[in-house]
Image: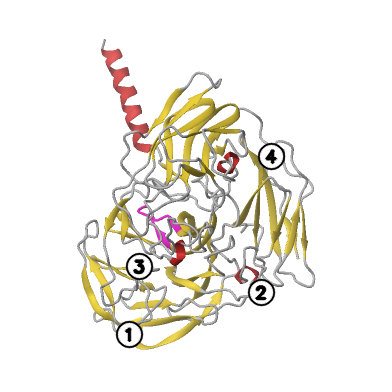
Amino acid sequence: MKIRILAIVFVLSALYASAQTRRLTYCNPLNLDYGYTPFANFAAWGKHRATADPTMTLFKGNYYLFSTNQFGYWWSPDMLNWKFVSRKFVRPYNEVKGDELCAPGTLVLGDTLLVIGSTYNKDFTLWMSTDPRTDTWKAAKDYFKVGAWDPGLFADDDGRVYIYHGSSNTLPMYGQEIDRKTFDPIGPKKEMIKLNWEQHGWERFGENNDNVFLTGFMEGGWMNKHNGKYYLQYAAPGTEGRGYGDGVYVGDKPLGPFTYQKHNPFSYKPGGFAKGAGHGATWADKFGNYWHISTMVIDVKNNFERRIGFWPAGFDPDGTLFTNTSYGDYPHYLPNGKEDHVNNDNFTGWMLLNYNKPVQVSSTLGAYVPNLAVDEDIKTYWSAKTANPGEWLQTDLGDVSTVRAIQINYADQDATFMGKSLGVYHQYKITASNDGKTWRTIVDKSNNKTDVPHDYVELKTPVKARYLKITNLHMPTGKFALSGFRVFGKGAGVVPDTVKNFIVLRGKAENRNSWLRWQQTDGAVGYTIYMGIAPDKLYNNILVYNANEYYFNGMEKDTPYYFQIEAFNENGISKRTKVMKVE
């Protein structure tokens, strides 16, 4: 009997330890209750959710996320479960019709968190709170005299405080010291950095860095200090394009001079379901791991229709700042200790199971056809004819597979809301089947009372299934429409072979551009291309579906590049090709 009791105690202890060490997962875009655009002219093509320009701050053990025009902000103890705090920061005498806190900047000074939005005026309020888990803010400075658009605030180790700001396709980014006690500017603003698109291919405007009718924008200043070096970050070339990214200059002093980092952009995500990784912030979590949060692009109903995502980041042994966006909109682990962000320890390895697989639906509105919900493009979507309970979409995985997680991305078809809408919610059920006849419920959100526009559900226990069906129970507004019903796990088949005949043709007259081609790999649904400025610094990547070529126009002029490629499908990822150098 004693042995049996000891065995039970051992098993329970092991289960408890496993529960304690189980890593939580997340999936980009982040599942936040995004507000709708407050501007009528931005909603002329359809009312829609929108935010951008995020900052992330670790303060007193919690994470605080501010972004554009949300009429409040979010906080979380774990980077997964976010609580919204409703708050209006813009005072009546500052208010622009419909506007709120735009492209905010935050700063931790001792036991106080500071926040301010963008303005060129000198009468904006700088706010402060010692417990921002609730709406307990007061003015730290009634009239902040810097007048900064896209402000980035930074406190150095010696206690001195600086601000970096600018948002223009003609003007540079500026820096200025501000008094720590009075928050008044100290001396004039100074020019820090500016775009050089003639040299840096990724700074050219356009969806593929190829439009010359408009010069690129420099915006979104942010500063980090690491090992005595100052990393001044900026966004370019424009929030509308897939190549929207963040670059960085490095200096020995907070106001420069600064030198362009050879690896740039350091935050870059031009491929996949949701594209773009610009105008953001770099921060360290509770365990000292660095992350980068930034803006993801939709750009369908308006060019400022955007979302938020974050990725592992860090500084390599040479002090190079990087962000790892590899499979950046697939499920990733959240931190529970020190991690290796270079090698992407955070990726779960759960693959997309239903890319362009057969779909059936209850009804279809016009040209918003069913397969647009599984084409891995957030810009396109299926819509039912109504928002009625009982509208449904069914996806066929092709074979019985192991399902680990599901992401439901709602599209704003015929939405009626403007600005922030509190108290709205989605309700649905997901059922699974092996044969399409016998169904079992695996996700039940019939009692959900929260707003989940990009709901991500990790199953407590993996499920074997071939068919999955989502049935609508309640929509907060608009039709039942999905830009992505994404099923993750592992298929029962084989991983693709290593890609063959990978070539990179780099322009002679214009060597910021290249044409990448490769032989199609049997069984592959997509490919991930890795590139960088050294064979051991292939930090950037491009994920491509159902193609065997890509035009890459984001290269540094006269700089050698190194490339690799791998194939993937629902069963896993192939070995990479050998590293290729391209002069």
How much space separates mark 2 and mark 3, taking CA atoms?
Answer: 32 Å
Vertical placement of residue 448 versus 82, above or below: above
Q: Quadrant of residue 24?
A: top left
| Residue range highlighted in magenta | 282-292
4 vs 3, front mark: 3
Give the residue at x 40% y 34%.
Answer: 389
- Picture coordinates of residue 256, whole percent (x, y): 47, 81
Badge 3 amino acid: Gly
Badge 1 amino acid: Pro
Q: In the drawing, what numbered circle is on residue 98?
A: 3
How many residues crowd mark 1 within 10 Å: few (<14), some (14–19), many (20+)?
A: some
Q: Is residue 231 visible?
A: no
Element under disc 1:
strand
Q: Nearer the viewer, residue 462 or 582?
A: 462
Element under disc 2:
loop
- Picture coordinates of residue 196, whole percent (x, y): 61, 77
How much space separates mark 2 and mark 4, taking CA atoms?
Answer: 35 Å
> Which residue in the protein does label 2 denote?
212
Is label 3 in contact with label 1 (beta carbons under 8 Å)?
Answer: no
> Which residue in the protein does label 4 denote?
524
Question: In the picture provided, is 257 more to the left or to the right than 355?
Answer: left
Q: Nearer the viewer, residue 128 or 124?
A: 124
Badge 4 amino acid: Ala
1 vs 2, front mark: 2
